[in-house]
Image (tube, helix red, strand yellow):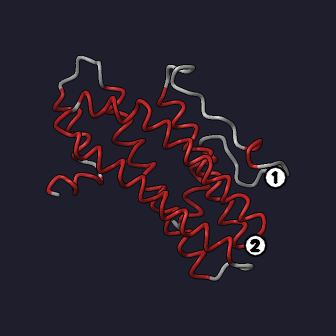
Amino acid sequence: MNLRSAISAITSALGFSSREPVQKVSPAVAIPELVSPEHETDLIAVLSRAHGQLRTLMARVLELADAQNFEEGRTELKRFETLLARHLMAENNGFFDKLKTNLPDYAGKIQRCQADLQGVTKELQLISNICDAEVAWRSHTTASLERLFDRVEERFTYEENSLFPVYLAIGDNRDVMNKTQIFDRSLYARLKSS
């Protein structure tokens, strides 16, 4: 299964559709504000919704690149950048801090997860600048976007399958070992020795 098929399947399962027509409005209006944790107590729901919106935008950007609609592709890529920045702020304001506080032995790995996210945003900025400079995106530019979106999807899957359950388990009477086993089975277990 390729990335486009996987993203389409996930977005469909979440009730989003990359096939829905995009409204012609400014990106600032088109991107819904993330609800701050002070206004919604379920931070995981906020983050999950953002994952769905970001997946939809990733699929849309790749769809527009395939259709060689580069102008609209640039607009959607800017929307993706904006929403990703908001999403990362929501993660940093509460999610990662709570994990580090409650699992101090894993604070270093959690910090590396946060650093990985910063790497994603820097790479996204570079690719976005290239996309802005090119009238028609070259094949390796589109391939770079696809690789970056693969990395973002891997990140979302990791958070949903490994970090979200740990976050939700904090405060339960479950054994801390159960929480750390979830963490160690993840793709970030490779960071254990670094």
Q: CA distance from mark 1 to mark 2?
A: 14 Å
Q: Quadrant of residue 5?
A: bottom right
Q: Which mark is residue 162?
A: none
Q: Secondary structure at mark 2?
A: loop
Which residue is found at the position 75% from the left and 55% from the top?
Answer: 19
The residue that disc 2 covers is: 67
The disc labelled 2 sits on which kind of residue?
Ala
Image mark count: 2
Provide residue 67's location: percent of width, then percent of height. 76, 72
Which residue is found at the position 53% from the left and 73% from the top?
Answer: 144
* Relative vertical location of residue 134 with respect to residue 35 in this rendering, above or below: below
The disc labelled 1 sits on which kind of residue?
Pro
Q: Which mark is residue 21?
A: 1
Quick one: 193 or 97, which is closer to the camera?
Answer: 97
Q: Quadrant of residue 51?
A: top right
- 10 Å neighbourhood of mark 1: few (<14), some, or many (≥20)? few
